[in-house]
Image (cartoon, helix red, strand yellow):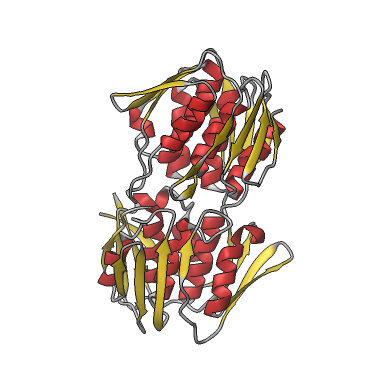
């Protein structure tokens, strides 16, 4: 096991290239189960989570060849309908093989998912949508066991207590592409990652209308073909680097990111005193000397993303004044508060809200990563803090940030890994 050592209070400078989107790559990789033809996927980030999905696809009968950030997925023989506990339990995103397996094989047995410990994230919407298409589903011994003799289009509402579900939308969307007749998904998630999946499925021959909207209409087809497809850039990685630069009062340039995917963050940072703007194919930023505290509430896209909540909190921790951070997507996603407070932050929790009283300076300390985005928040705090910060359980960061230490070093940060 490794830890990350950060020597703080160093300004960042230069250009960072944003990797492909983890949250887009995982369901798109799962969608290759829908065809027997070869699929070439480009801009796949080299991450712990994508390696897990590759191993899962192999266990299901696919052949995967890795060539840098490109993977070639082919079929040899019959697919296996059982998604093993050892793989699915480590990463929630792997649960999205359920829809494609069910559509392709008319049966699936998929372990209930795992991933980051950020509160209850049920799979009820996934099961509701697939049942509407005609699947018979039971939960047995920690597995979802599903069968579908007659997969038929339906009118489905996928809104949940905390809004639309990205993975549930992905699962039902993929399954509906091979269902007989028309499927309408109401309250579909509108995230760019869902849009990317829909565009990929369309390129495979699926018939989908309303892409990017909360109402998707899918007309089922008999089979899907192979393709070559490039994954969109990771908007969460892009936002994280912007917040790293903001916390160190630095100006950096982002290459390969999509500005339109970042508008909720751009709007809030403008109120803080940080200007983020496109310049040709690049994204640049400028920081004012004095920053202002700003409150945020997370919502499904196009609202402020829950996956940037922890990182934004780390910035507000060093902006003098009071800000309130509310998470309406995952209300329990506040495990990072205690670790930020270990570094000198003044943050308290009241229900779904975190009250942040900004301080002048944070101080380096040994801290423990609890989940992927909390880890990123601790990196931001460590970059801004005086002294040395040690972040333990580094494997969380490796699930979602490709070459983080190398990219930060190229920007002038003093960051390195050590064995525990």
Q: What x and y, as percent, mark residue 385?
A: 36, 76
Q: Is residue 36 left or right of residue 378?
A: right
Q: Is residue 207 left or right of residue 191?
A: right
Query: Is residue 303 shown above or below 226?
Result: below
The one of 10 and 162 positioned closer to us in this rendering: 162
Q: Quadrant of the C terminus?
A: bottom left
* Residue 54 visible (yes or no): no
Query: Is residue 32 shown above or below 258?
Result: above
Residue 66 lies in what quarter of the image?
top right
Q: What x and y, as percent, mark residue 151?
A: 57, 19
Query: Is residue 315 shown above or below 393?
Result: below
* Residue 409 visible (yes or no): yes
Q: Residue at x 50, y 40 (%)?
A: 167
Query: Is residue 374 shown above or below 96?
Result: below
Residue 214 lies in what quarter of the image?
top right
Q: Residue at x 65, y 47 (%)?
A: 213
Residue situated furthest bottom in the rendering? 290
Q: Residue at x 48, y 25 (%)?
A: 131
Q: What x and y, as percent, mark residue 336?
A: 32, 62
Total marks placed:
0
The one of 171 and 184 positioned closer to us in this rendering: 184
Residue situated furthest right in the rendering? 280
Q: What x and y, as percent, mark residue 141?
A: 28, 24
Residue 189 lies in what quarter of the image?
top right
């Amino acid at each position: 096991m490794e830890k990350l050592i950060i020597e703080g209070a160093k300004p960042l400078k230069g250009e960072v290239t944003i990797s492909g989107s983890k949250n887009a790559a995982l369901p798109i990789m799962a969608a290759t189960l829908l065809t027997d033809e070869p699929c070439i996927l480009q801009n796949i980030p080299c991450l712990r989570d994508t390696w897990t999905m590759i191993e899962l696809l192999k266990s299901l009968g696919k052949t995967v060849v890795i060539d840098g950030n490109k993977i070639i997925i082919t079929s040899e023989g019959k697919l296996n309908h059982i998604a093993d506990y050892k793989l699915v339990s480590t990463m929630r995103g792997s649960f999205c093989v359920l829809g494609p397996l069910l559509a392709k094989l008319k049966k699936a047995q998929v372990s209930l998912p795992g991933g980051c410990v950020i509160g209850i994230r049920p799979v009820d919407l996934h099961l509701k949508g697939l049942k509407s298409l005609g699947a018979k589903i039971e939960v047995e011994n920690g597995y979802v066991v599903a069968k579908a003799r007659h997969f038929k289009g339906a009118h489905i509402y996928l809104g949940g207590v905390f809004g639309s579900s990205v993975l549930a939308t992905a699962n039902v969307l993929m399954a509906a592409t091979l269902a007989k007749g028309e499927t309408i998904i109401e309250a579909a998630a509108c995230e760019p990652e869902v849009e990317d999946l829909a565009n990929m499925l369309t390129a495979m021959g699926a018939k989908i209308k309303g892409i990017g909207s909360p109402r998707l209409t899918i007309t089922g087809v008999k089979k899907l073909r192979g393709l070559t497809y490039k994954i969109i850039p990771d908007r969460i990685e892009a936002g994280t680097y912007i917040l790293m630069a903001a916390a160190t009062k630095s100006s950096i340039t982002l290459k390969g990111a999509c500005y339109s995917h970042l508008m909720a963050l751009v709007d809030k940072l403008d109120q803080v005193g940080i200007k983020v703007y496109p310049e040709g194919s690049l994204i640049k930023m400028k920081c004012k000397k004095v920053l202002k505290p700003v409150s945020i509430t997370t919502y499904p896209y196009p609202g402020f993303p829950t996956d940037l909540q922890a990182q934004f909190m780390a910035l507000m921790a060093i902006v003098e004044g009071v800000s309130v951070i509310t998470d309406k997507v995952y209300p329990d996603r506040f495990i990072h508060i205690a670790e930020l407070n270990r570094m000198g932050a003044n943050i308290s929790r009241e229900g779904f809200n975190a009250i942040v009283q900004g301080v002048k300076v944070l101080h380096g300390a040994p801290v423990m990563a609890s989940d992927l985005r909390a880890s990123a928040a601790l990196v931001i705090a460590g970059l801004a803090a005086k002294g040395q910060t040690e972040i333990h359980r580094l494997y969380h960061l490796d699930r979602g940030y490709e070459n983080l230490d190398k990219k930060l070093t190229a920007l002038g940060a003093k960051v390195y890994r050590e064995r525990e």
